[in-house]
């Protein structure tokens, strides 16, 4: 369920991470880093049904520890511990889940998350809109093809549950069942609601009518007129937020890729407001024979209560954030690079220091040392007397563009011969 | 024993890591990445007495796992699993040790290691010399003050043990006791040898005479003439290696900071040849009142047997490598920055988008969206109607150099006012 990353992977992944980090920095975020190890109690009660996927450490004396499951809970703990009420931060790091790995879909037990979050008491929906803008920028920058960002609001969902006759104690349960709508058809979700979760068939049917709705500003207006929802305080507040959010998204010019989708629920317990998830849309691709099915590539939302759970006095810090699922995007880029036949260089060496004759190791060592000290990326073969052909072959194999040749003649004249590998041209310096 | 890293830390640490990685790339290394989780059996029997410091994961079903203790053992496993016989790689990542943290000396339970290793069957001492050159380059580049790289050879040490009458079965034990010479005086080490380790007092005294020696090429020549050592095959081979190594180090021009030190032993079991460790030398520093005592900042050596331990057929791949102890270096740099009063910017924002009047949120959102799309790092306050003074104050606090101001007048004229925060000058664009 975990994997090694060979150099060609790392080069490609670093390119991808650099693009994501560039976007986070463009939006003024600062980086923090937290340990992979968290106290077990920090992670308890934050992830709903997924808590069983947390890796725990053996009790070897001392604190009871676990591996972080995401970067959001550690961020909330960090804010509370340091009494920070206002911060825009990003964090790119690995998280751990004892999940059934689906390696073909880019799902592993150790994987990178790239998180951007805005914490602080601000005017409504401005930070939320920025998070969606970030998803839009990153998915556009990476040229991953067409995508859709589904947006919903936990209060709207809760309002829906309320008007459908679900007791408040079952909101979270209903929510995590609705969340399965992206993986199973409504009929199955309905039967889970009625069977396992004990909702009445009538309530389930009423929920079904709402959660199959999706649209834009028009849908928001329609629901604001809905005779039942418009009477519900939660729903009204949530729809008010959504209306304001769409206003800001219109100013950002990105509503074309945004869908208000009532079936989006997000599994985690800690969301309290706007929630969203970006999916890549299936497309014809002339280079790739089998399209990779990758599902969600980014997700996030508002969690206004999480920081308060870590503060002794329960002081809340409202937060909203987004997590980019870099591994899934990586699977696509990797397949694209493979299909294109591009040879990814895994080193950056500029010059190979070579000799055409024997007994010139000392001259090579002296020259390469000078090159390194001058900041030039240089290599030599670790042999006393390598054949010139082998040295040139090494350049061809690894993509080193130049060879610096010191032979007996060059030593006498105090020059070196610089050879352009691709053009097979030489100059004396 | 672990810690959070706030933005100012991360910025400084990233600078440091960038300098180290630049050196590794200059020497033609490719990057790999391996999981934090390793099979427990992979780590068993590699670390001598320190094995008790390995973090183990709870048995939650599936494989029995542990957190990596260093980056060397995972690298050896990687080579064996992928049948790679030839590779120059670097790896910058965190490792985990259940040690007693000494946080003032920059020692934590989670910390970065920066490893560079050369694997492959090559002519003797050429890769070993390059590893020492790398340590020299990095410590010079970082301007950490005076330093010394101690070098020894496991075969020389084993030869010393042999001629002092130690049975081969006690070489590793004797070695890990000698390793404590940097932390305790010879008298204490001697009594541990005689008491706990059961060596004869005479043997311990004879060892004492050797391990207190240090010097350069002169010492190598002297030991090659030593009546007892010169008769010992191990010692002779080791001293031959050392002589060749010093020849190459002379060509690199770095022998001035290198000391052949027979007290250097390195605790880990897997070393088989040249071993080394770099220490910073105490110095007067006008900026820092209390000098941080940091001890070893880099270490490494040759381990020709480790890869074979992971190969089903025991095929060996000779390796030599170096690990840079970035956390200790970080402690020094951090103290230096603090003493200098340098204010480290934690974000890279170039422009704050601001308004002098109310009801201009829409104009700000439109402008900032255009800036982001043009790749400009921009922020705005998340308030509908922030005061101009607050907006300017935010720039002062966070070091944002420019403010783009859109007011009613600017909107009418279709311009923006760009203000240089430090110079308090404005231009209209």
Image (cartoon, coloured by chain):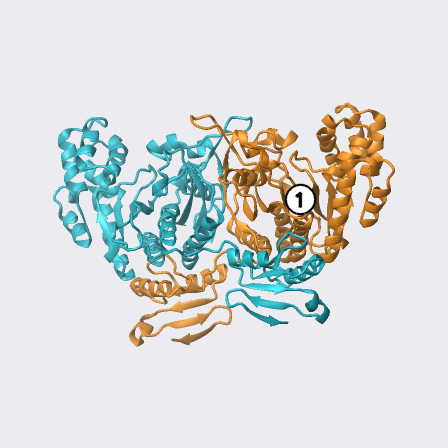
Chain colours: A cyan, B orange
Residue ID at (32%, 41%): A271
Kindly identify the residue that appears in the image at 77 percent across and 23 percent down.
B198
- Give x and y (percent) for residue B279: 71, 47
**Which quadrant: the N terminus of chain A?**
top left
- Can the viewer see residue B2? no
Residue A281 at what x, y percent from top left? 26, 50
**Would you identify the image quadrant in which residue A26 lies?**
bottom left
B423 shown above or below B54: below
Q: Is residue A296 left or right of residue B1?
A: left
Tell me if mark 1 has few (under 14), some (14-19) or many (20+) residues whose alpha carbon lies within 10 angstroms of its own: many
Judge whether residue B365 can be spotted in this image.
yes
Q: Position of residue A354 (x, y in %)?
A: 63, 60
Which of the 4 image quadrants contains residue A256? bottom left
Which percent across, then down, holds residue B337?
Answer: 62, 55
Which image quadrant is residue B200 in?
Answer: top right
Name the quadrant of the C terminus of chain A.
bottom right
Q: Nearer the viewer, residue B351 or A196?
A: A196
| Pick the front one: B355 or B132 | B132
Horizontal side, residue A4 vs residue B239: left or right: left
The chain carrying label 1 is: B
Judging depth in this view, the residue of A168 and B149 nearest the camera is: B149
Residue, far right: B227
User: What residue does disc 1 label?
Assistant: B299
């Amino acid at each position: 369920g975990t994997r090694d990353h060979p150099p060609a992977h790392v080069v490609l992944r670093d390119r991808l991470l650099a693009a994501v980090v560039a976007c986070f920095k463009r939006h003024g975020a600062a980086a923090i880093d937290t340990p992979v190890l968290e106290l077990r109690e920090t992670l308890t009660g934050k992830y709903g049904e997924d808590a069983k996927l947390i890796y725990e450490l053996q009790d070897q004396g001392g604190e009871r520890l676990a591996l972080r499951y995401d970067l959001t809970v550690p961020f909330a703990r960090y804010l509370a511990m340091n009494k920070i009420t206002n911060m825009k931060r990003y964090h790119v790091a690995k998280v751990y889940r004892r999940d059934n790995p689906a390696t073909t879909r880019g799902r592993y037990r150790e994987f990178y998350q790239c998180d951007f979050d805005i914490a602080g008491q601000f005017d409504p929906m401005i930070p939320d809109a920025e998070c969606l803008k970030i998803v839009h920028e990153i998915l556009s920058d990476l040229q991953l093809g067409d995508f859709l960002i589904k947006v919903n609001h936990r209060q709207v969902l809760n309002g829906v549950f309320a008007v459908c006759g679900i007791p408040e104690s079952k909101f979270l349960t209903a929510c995590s069942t609705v969340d399965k709508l992206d993986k199973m058809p409504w009929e199955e979700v309905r039967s889970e609601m009625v069977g396992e979760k004990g909702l009445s068939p009538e309530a389930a049917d009423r929920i079904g009518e709402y959660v199959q709705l999706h649209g834009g500003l028009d849908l928001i207006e329609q629901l604001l007129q809905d005779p039942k929802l418009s009477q519900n305080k939660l729903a009204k507040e949530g729809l008010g937020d959504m209306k304001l959010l769409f206003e800001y998204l219109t100013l950002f010019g990105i509503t074309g890729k945004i869908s208000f989708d009532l079936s989006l629920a997000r599994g985690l317990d800690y969301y309290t407001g706007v929630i969203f998830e970006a999916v890549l849309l299936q497309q014809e691709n002339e280079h790739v024979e089998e399209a990779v099915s990758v599902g969600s590539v980014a997700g996030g939302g508002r969690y206004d209560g999480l920081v308060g759970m870590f503060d002794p006095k329960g002081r809340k810090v409202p937060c909203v954030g987004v997590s980019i699922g870099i591994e899934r995007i990586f699977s696509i880029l990797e397949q694209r690079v493979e299909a294109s036949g591009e040879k990814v260089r895994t080193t950056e060496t500029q010059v190979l220091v070579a000799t055409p004759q024997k007994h010139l190791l000392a001259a090579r060592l002296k020259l390469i040392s000078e090159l390194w000290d001058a900041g030039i990326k240089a290599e030599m073969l670790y042999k006393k007397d390598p054949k010139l052909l082998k040295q040139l072959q090494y350049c061809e194999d690894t993509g080193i563009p130049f060879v610096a040749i010191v032979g007996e003649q060059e030593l006498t004249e105090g020059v070196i011969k610089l050879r352009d590998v691709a053009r097979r041209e030489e100059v004396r310096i």
